[in-house]
Amino acid sequence: MTDLFGFQLRRVGRNKQYLFFTVLLPALFTIFFTQVIGGQAPAGEFQDLAGAVLVSMMAYGAIGAALGATIRIAFDRSSGWLRQLRVTPVPAGSVFAVDVLVGALLVLPSLVVVALVGRFVNGVEFGLGTWVALVGSLWAGSMVFVALGVAVGLALDAQAAGAAIGILGTVLAALGGLWFPVEMFPDGMVPLAHALPSYWFAELGRDVAAGTFTGAPVLVLAGYGAVFAAAALVVARRRPLHAVAG
């Protein structure tokens, strides 16, 4: 299992498109949104704006990383790679666990890089404890989206899974208030934003950054995580990892 984990980690980590969309793009968005919107804000509000953008982009990058890494299951099934693993001593459960671990670990680079950009490019000033808590809490919260990515990767074939993840990522970011604050939404769209796990994921980060932890984001995310994990288990029983595509 250790060898398989290392192989899968290197395999996804060498994917230049994956690195661009999950690490570089959120970092660039962090600079863009802060400098463009922040340039129009009063001087005394720049720090607050920069901090808010930082948290939103950390959440955005983490969601994209979690979803992008875990739908590899769909591509591995379609390519026949999972069928080849059947002749090895690695059990199907371990293959599944490796994909989850890889998805979880590959969220960290996005969180760390965006945090570094926020601190050293945009000048966001948090205490060391807040930085550690922010990265740690969002990393833990990203497991919700790892579970969602696994469920999608198990349910769909490669082409459909890729399209679904692209749509999911866009919807979660745009409607969950990661690109623009929910306060800017029309009144009718606010309840929709509050119904999405991406909103509560970013809210978790905002609570940690502000030092006003309420517990509500944790409860909501735990509920979503349980639903997505249950869905992944149900789909896994109906479509085993080694099933032939189509």
Image: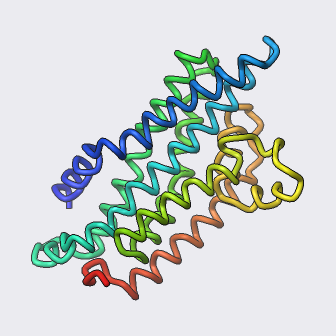
Q: Name the residue: 61% across, 15% down.
A: 123
Residue 30 against residue 240 in the figure, above or below: above
Q: Looking at the image, which is closer to me, 208 or 84?
A: 84
Residue 239 appears at what percent x and percent y?
A: 36, 84
Q: Is residue 122 left or right of residue 186?
A: left
Query: What is the residue that sits farthest to the right in this orientation?
Result: 187
Q: Is residue 218 left or right of residue 106?
A: right
Report the label total.
Answer: 0
Task: Return the residue found at the far left.
Answer: 87
The residue at 47%/36% (across/down) is 25
For the question of whether residue 214 can be seen, the reply is yes
Q: Residue furthest bottom?
A: 238
Image position, residue 214 (x, y; %): 77, 46
Is 45 placed left or right of 204 in the picture?
right
Quadrant where the C terminus is found in the figure: bottom left
- Counting from the top left corner in percent of width and height, residue 73 is at 33, 67
Quarter of the figure with residue 222: bottom right
Quadrant of the frame with the N terminus = bottom left
Nearer to me, 213 or 114 = 114
User: How far across and how far down the image is residue 94, in percent?
Assistant: 27, 69
Please indicate, yes or no, whether residue 144 appears anywhere in the rendered image. no
Report the coloring of the rendering.
Answer: rainbow
- Please tell me in which quadrant of the rendered image residue 92 appears: bottom left
